[in-house]
Amino acid sequence: MIPMKTESAWRGTADCKACGIRDLVLFADLNEHDFKLIHAPIDDLDYAAGASLFNEGGAAKGVFTLRHGMVKLVRSTLDGRPRIVRVLRAGDVVGLEALASAQYDCDAVALSPVSVCRIPLEVIQKLSSNSPRLHAQLMKKWQHALKDSDDWLADMNFGTARRRVGNLVLKMRSAENGEISMLFSREDMGAMLDLKLETVSREISRLVREEAIEQLDKQGRIYRVIHADRLALD
């Protein structure tokens, strides 16, 4: 637990003042006066790949700012199948629906080892009421989340199997190195793209054969994008 004190608000175990994504996180624009309003503790947490941050239908008690790693949001279809509706990265806020609902509307599962700050709802609500800076930041996060969800739906759920897989490879390129794409298990990819596991494997193999991408690891999770223009072809 990290008690948020004015003089140490940027000096918790997360070392927020030196954080490489400080401009992206929820508290980026807060000043010393804003931090005086914070009394509840904020948790600095690490999760292993595959661990759950929260579950669909669970009581919403806080939001998570994602400092490192990737988190998938999974929702169950009417027939009980899991469907990945979005992937979040460093700088994103996980569980924004907690601000408007009493429960989470997705499972949030770590796709890789992740580091997060868990912020109690009471902190967000008090700051939102008293700090125009945080209120503006929340609105920006809402807008980003809505646009990202719309883009994800458009890119991942329409078109041929080849186009869907190609779009996912492009979307999962590293922010640090745009040539490197970090993918997931074929099961996860199928759940993201609404495709069968065999179809995903076939399309990935085809892109490798056509030299659009190059496999860099034995597990088939890391690829180098060689010809990005070929990934958007039908």
Image (cartoon, grey):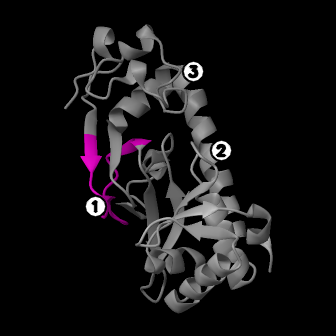
* Image quarter of the C terminus: bottom right
Let me know if residue 153 appears in the view: no
Question: Given the image, on which type of amino acid does mark 1 rest?
Answer: Ala
- Percent position (x, y) of residue 157? 67, 76
The residue drawn where x is 35% and y is 12% is 36
SS assignment at label 2: helix
Left or right: 62 with respect to 210? left
Neighbours of disc 3 within 10 Å: few (<14), some (14-19), many (20+): some
- Residue identified by numbered label 1: 51
What's under tag 3, amino acid-wise?
Pro
Residue 147 horizontal/vertical position (percent): 68, 52
* Relative depth, front residue between 197 and 66: 197
Q: Earlier in the sequence, mark 3 or mark 2?
A: 3
Residue designated by label 2: 143
Q: Which residues are magenta?
A: 45-67
Query: Which one is in front, 162 or 109?
Result: 162
Q: Are marks 3 and 2 in contact (CB under 8 Å)?
A: no
**Mark 2 residue type:** Gln
230, 152: nearer the viewer: 230
Q: Position of residue 136 (x, y in %)?
A: 60, 28
Q: Which residue is mark 3?
A: 132
Secondary element at tag 1: loop
Q: At x 39% / y 61%, what residue is drawn? A: 111
Please name which of the two marks, 3 or 2, marks the residue nearer to the observer.
Answer: 2
| Mark 3, secondary structure of its residue | helix
- Is label 1 or label 2 in front? 1
User: Is 35 contained in the magenta span?
Assistant: no
Provide residue 10's location: percent of width, then percent of height: 36, 18
Tell me if 169 is positioned left or right of 55 in this view. right
Callout 1–callout 2 Cβ contact below 8 Å: no
Q: Is residue 47 magenta?
A: yes
Alpha-carbon distance for marks 1 and 3?
Answer: 35 Å
